[in-house]
Amino acid sequence: MPMPNVRMLGLPRAGSYINRLPLFTRGILAAIVLFEALCLQSWWDVRAWGALVPEEIGFATLYRANTYPFIHLNVLHLIPNLLALTPMLERFENEYGTLTSLALFLGPFSTFPAFLYVGMEKWVFRLNTAVMGASIWFFLLAGIEAIRTYRVNPRLVIAGQSIPTWTTPLVILLAIAVLVPRSSAFGHLCGLAVGYICGLGYLKYLAPPEWALRWIEKQLNLLGRLPHYVSVDQKTYGRFGVLPLSNLTPAPVVSAGLVGTSALRLRRDPRVLKLPPYLSLLCVLVGVAWLFLLPLNDYSRRTYISENALLPGQVHTYFSGSDQNVFRAYKHEVDALVGKTNTERNDKLESIVKGFGLKTARQNFTYQAAGHSYSGENLYAILQAPRGDATEAVVLVAAWENAKHEINRKGIPLALTLLRYFKRWSLWSKDIILLLTPDSIAGPQAWVDAYHDAHNPSRVSSLPLKSGLLQGAIAIDYAQEGRFESVHIVYDGVNGQLPNLDLINSIVNIAGGQMGMGVALQEMWRHDDGYKHRLRTMLRGMLKQGLGLPSGPHSSFIPYHVDAVTLQPFGDGWQDEMAIGRVIEGSFRSLNNLLEHLHQSFFFYLLMQRERFVSIGTYLPSAMLVAASFTIMAISLWVKSGQAEAERATVEAKTETAPAPAVERDLFLPLGVVTLIQSFSIVPLYLFNHVSESMLTPLFATFTLLNVLLPVLLSHLLTQAAAPTLQQYHLVKSFSLLLLGMFLSSLATLNFSLALIIGVLASPLSFARPAASRVTRLVTTALLSAISPPAVLLAGAAYWGADVSGVLREAAVGWHVCGTYSPVVVWCVWWPAWLAGSVAVLGRTGEGGAGGKEKTA
Amino acid sequence: MDGAKATPGRAVGAVDLYVSAAALRLAILALLPGLPVLLTGRVEISTPVTSFKRLQEGLFLYNHNVSPYDGGVYHQAPLFLPLFSLLPSFLTFPIFTYLLYIAVDLLSANALWRIAESGEAGSSARFTSARREKRWSGFVIAALFLFNPFTVATCIGRSTSVFTTCAILHAIAKAVSGSPFGAMVALSFASYLSMYPLLLLPPLILLCYDRQRPERATKSGLKFSATCVSVVAGVLALLFQMSYLITGSWEFLPSTYGVQLTLSDLTPNVGLWWYFFIEMFDSFRSFFLAVFWLHLSSYVGALTLRIRRQPLVVLTLLLGIFAIFKPYPSISDTSLFLAMVPLYRHVFPLMRYTFVIAAVIMYATFLGPAFYHLWIYAGSGNANFFYAITLVWGLGQSLLVCDLMFAVLRDEWEVERPEMVGKEIRQI
């Protein structure tokens, strides 16, 4: 079989078309352009010289009947004419030869329409409209073509109405007359009329006789001397000669080359199908490598304050001096409350706050999660802004216990002292709310939910007292006794949502710049601003974000679009509680300045040092690439599932004529399998969120064991029940990967880190393929089991020294209290994808024709 | 379900199917009591002209003898008001409203079943596909409609577009079963409820004309269509008169159809109009309104002429085009289009982008709510996020429309030129 012709894409094809233009066409085009260029000078008015003006046609000016097609009004007239004329002229010349074209176009094809026009214009219409331009040739040629089309294909049926095909140039003529200003419809009509007459064969005698042309050609050896010359013998029978209908014995490959577009050819190329796994792998690798580039100076940016109204560190803070004595007094009171019940504590604290002259209120809440009851009573007080209208508020939170269940021994008295101090100032334009909660997770969550009326009244009571829109919240977690060195900013919200970067920047600015204390992020107590430390900070941040669990009292605020952080003093240094008090004072003064909600700076960012970050535009591509790798594989498997069958069809029935290009896929079974597996995911989601804590460990152990056996069992059942073909396994995998890619790319916009982590952990699923032999099948299954969600959970817990049941309890608490959706992602996105991937790997094709294909696939 | 029993030989599985579809909906309503409220509030399901919340507002005003169109919230047809007033109050007995919606869904499925069983999709009066043997039964097509997540979500979200869907499907079902009068009455109801189904009139008349019963067929096409148009006009006039009697004024015309024509409510939806008209300067508004409407209606004539031989195809494609380009589209319109598409099972092998279409539509389905969340709730995105996704959504649907059109035309072409079957073609 001969090799197919040189394959051409769009652009090279256009280039080659221009290269193949025959000689006379080139000459005409060049002449037209040349005349247009001549029009540019001023000393000779070419247009006046050459246009066809009926009044001026005399014997001496007959040259006008030949020159007018070469001359145009302006460039805008020229270009469409050239574009329209070129293909027609090229076709004409290729058909009749260069010499004939030359004779006809320089002679009758110019003069006949010209005389017709002049005659009609002068003696019938008594007008004198000058015409010029090559469009007359276009219509002439269109007329010839139309008559010829009419002979082959007389009627065009549109909606039952048959229209003679010779009218098509008339339609064009009308359209141009209506749409193009200053076009001479009558001039065009003259050209068209001559074209029709010529097409009908009445002007045949005008063409020079063939023997004469041959003689000239031979004498002058034109064919040898002139490039692009179309000889009398070379001429074809026109385009219509190569229609598939009349081409009775086309070689199959050539006909594919003729008929198939380049995209279709590309689709058939077997190399294209081999590409996706590598492409997919490349996506994953680039995605992960991208992440490791981020800490470099070239990819991350220094932080800056976007919101100018914040003016952090620009005010003098006065919290010191006698307030220290007040603090000590409150500290004594709070120390005395250790060991008392929540209500007793609140009674005492409420009396203190009432002593400032503030309104207070309490709120009860009870949550049930993992067999435990999380209940308590929040106490809060509202300091009405002396210069505000109670439409906005800032919250100061102090939980009795921090996230590690240490008593907030200094935080509570500090919050009380600050509130007392704030009461003395008259500059607040926003209300200040002091919120004292019994714990760090459930209490703030209950309060914020109730503040926004989004609570479940059966568990959380409504707030009796409310202020305006919350503009920000700062939580104090100061459990350590004695002085401290630096302050640790905790900023992760529920589900990986983050506060506006401006809030963190302001606090860094105030604490670091104004107060001269160190600032740490993500428990990186020492940070040398090197690559390693930056990377570690970033990865820790991503892990926390991915887990989506609340990390402190501030976490619950962020989903309500209230920017919030927790400040934790740490280390052994010389800073005292007054210093952290002044940091908070400064931050409150900055928040107080805000005219509108924090919105200027970023909501999606990764911090890698207190003054270095990357924004979403820089890091999102890595998660999207990982998600895209699944989609690529899904598409390739889909194509493959159609292709494999086609191949078999050709092998089996080679003698059959023209196998159908796309084979129908059997979709019901794969869709059913994927749907079934997806619906399984409700089981672990429900179990792990509704079992009491004591049952979590045995449940997890059982689940892990069953999880190893489940793919084997499922695959066995599937083979027994349906005996799927290889195509169906491909489709199962394709659909499951498509779903995974889709979920992950949606998720990447909400919680980048979670999407990336799951994406990377699930990436081997794209490359696992049905194993041929028993050994490889075993190995692949073992490897896949190692990356199953329970196994990863176990490994992660072991690595960070956490207790699996503790992690699961936290997840259950997050699910019930804060609405963390990470469990949904793990059990309803990752786990089903893993299960479907494992089933596809274990899959044995049923008996029949597909069995033989298994080895080669 | 009565209809299912009425025709013998079709009842196989019908009752089971309808019962299970109703049970699924009731189970969702019983097990997830928060879901209806959530879905009713979603912009993808409830548009200003179909929202159940707005209906309740109108109902409240109506029951308190205030014009329901006062306040500019209610933009739906006046005849909904007595219908829902007859039901026990939604707040005390929501189950009756749910049962009404479920019944409407089942009626739609039943109509779809009849359309599928008629075989009109594979062989119409003027064209018989060579591939018509390969088709799905009415059971499968009704099941695909009833268990389509979009349909279920619309039903749970109680969008009033289900009534329009039901009316359109019944109009088509009547047309294929050879009762032009019933078809025209059903179409009048659909047009009365949502206005845009009026654009389906030309292909529907053709469908009725082709499927007339031979014993009382009207030969003259002109006479036939004049009769059809006058029936539609008469029924619409009657409905308008009833609406006038109910509300006591003609105020409902600008508040229902006027809103659709002028797009005065710019609540975001899955369509392409709202964003344009938010951005637009007021001086250009009327011009672009005309352009948008002209664009929407221009498909009717063109498709009706081009695919004259298969009017049901025209109806299907138009429903797809409306789901993309009408002023207030929702997933309900998409579910109607997707319900009609399986009728063309026989041309599925000719479609070229099924996987891409499925992937694009699914991606848009998931990314849409995510971006809406980023825009409205998280505050970290903006309107462009959601609009970009609605563009993708429109792209997915328009791909499906184009691909289906390609497949149908290719099918016609292969019947005309059998020697080209299986050969790849390209545009010349």
Image (tube, rainbow, N blue to C red):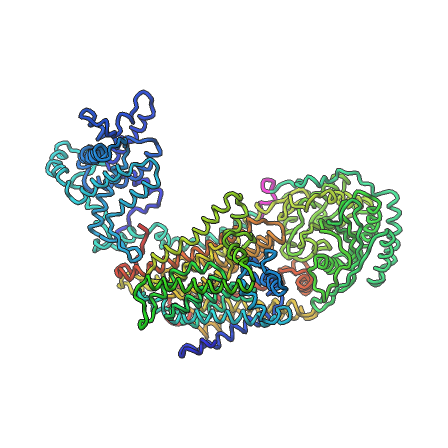
Residue nearest the viewer, comparing A604 with B379: B379
- Residue A514 horizontal/vertical position (percent): 76, 39
Can residue A828 be seen by looking at this rendering? yes
A292 drawn magenta: yes
Quarter of the picture containing the C terminus of chain A is bottom left
User: Which quadrant holds residue A374?
Assistant: bottom right
The picture places residue B137, in percent across and down from the top left corner, at 40, 72
Residue under the point 31% across and 71% down = B214
Instruction: Measuring from the top left, give residue A18's x and y in whole percent.
Output: 30, 38
- The magenta-colored residue range is A291-299
User: A230 left or right of B406?
Assistant: left
In the current view of this chain or complex, which residue is farthest to the top? Answer: A43
Percent x, y for residue A701? 63, 69
Residue A99 lies, with reference to residue A353, above or below; the image says above
Is residue B416 toward the left or the right of residue B160 in the image? Answer: left
Q: Is residue B411 magenta?
A: no
| Dominant SS in magenta | loop
| Quadrant housing residue A593 | top right
Which residue corresponds to the image point at 59% horizontal and 60% vertical from the top-left? B68
Evaluate whether residue A832 shows in this view: no
Which corner quadrant holds the N terminus of chain A?
A: bottom left
